[in-house]
Amino acid sequence: MKEIILGKSVKNKEIKGFFFGDEKSFNKTLIIGGIHGVEPQSKEVCELYIDEIKDKPFLKDCFLVLIPCINPDGIKLETRGNANGVDLNRNFPSNSWQSVPLANNNAYYPGVKPASEPETQIIVNLLNKHNFKKIVAIHTNHTIQFPNPPMVNYDGEQSRELAEKLSVATGLIAHHDIGYPTPGSLGCWIGKDLKKISVTVELDDTKTAEELYSKHKNLFEVGVIES
Ligand SMILES: [Zn+2]
């Protein structure tokens, strides 16, 4: 395992990536947690997985970059967005990006332009550097405007197979529609525009990270191995 500082947040906090396996392998996966600061379990389950695998030989023919916390300022401030109040999951440079937050709800503020935020730029740069085959984003189903159940959500038909395998591994339903529009989301950009495999796992917000990890830990290994 290699621990690499990928960049810094608005408030100058280091954002770390944990690199596993062979960079030359065909099966490259990016897993991201802590995108929304109000979903701390999404960060903590990633840290539990790192703790479990860091001293073991990594899965054969696989390459993984795991970013447990892309939004450290939001986690500290306990806000959905980053320190600029930008919802990172509405700030990606997708064709669907729009400047006006949905339903005038500032919780979804998309920023002044696509990829305006340093945290978003880290993901964009990483995508440009490594030809990831698939991206798995970990969230919890924190309700802001629309209630939605825990699920494995996916963008684009090419993502369905991995979503269905993760559904079997976790016991969560697989669904292509999260129930509301998400312009500028990671899934829109990766799955709909770049046509790569993009899965968003929404874990149960009412459970602790330890409970979630013991129940759904297979999601990491299945997410990495399946190609
Ligand atoms: Zn979220």
Image (cartoon, rainbow, N blue to C red):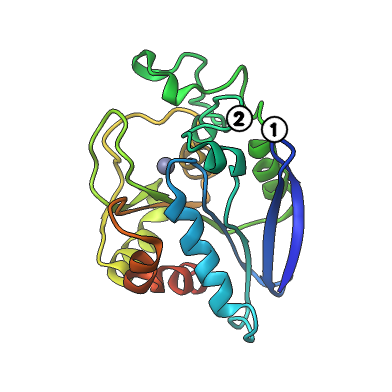
Where is residue 36 drawn, in percent x and y? 48, 40
**Which quadrant of the figure has residue 115?**
top right
Counting residues from the N terminus, which is met first, the one under dot 2 or under dot 1? 1
In this rendering, is residue 168 above or below 33? below
Q: Is residue 17 above or below residue 108?
A: below
10 Å crowding of disc 2: few (<14), some (14-19), many (20+): many
Q: Amino acid at mark 2?
A: Ala
Q: Quadrant of the N terminus?
A: bottom right
Look at the picture and state if 19 lies above or below 91: below
Task: Residue under label 2, please give it.
Answer: 83
Q: Nearer the viewer, residue 214 or 136?
A: 214
Q: Nearer the viewer, residue 101 or 12?
A: 12
Q: Is residue 135 visible?
A: yes
Image coordinates of residue 201 in percent, x first then y, are 38, 54
Q: Is residue 8 above or below residue 97?
A: below
Residue at the spot of label 1: 10
Q: Secondary structure at mark 2?
A: loop
Identify the residue at image location x=61%, y=25%: 84
Badge 1 amino acid: Val
Answer with left or right where residue 55 lies relative to residue 5.
left
The reply to whether callout 2 and callout 1 are in contact (CB within 8 Å) is yes
Horizontal side of residue 105 vs 194, given as left or right: left
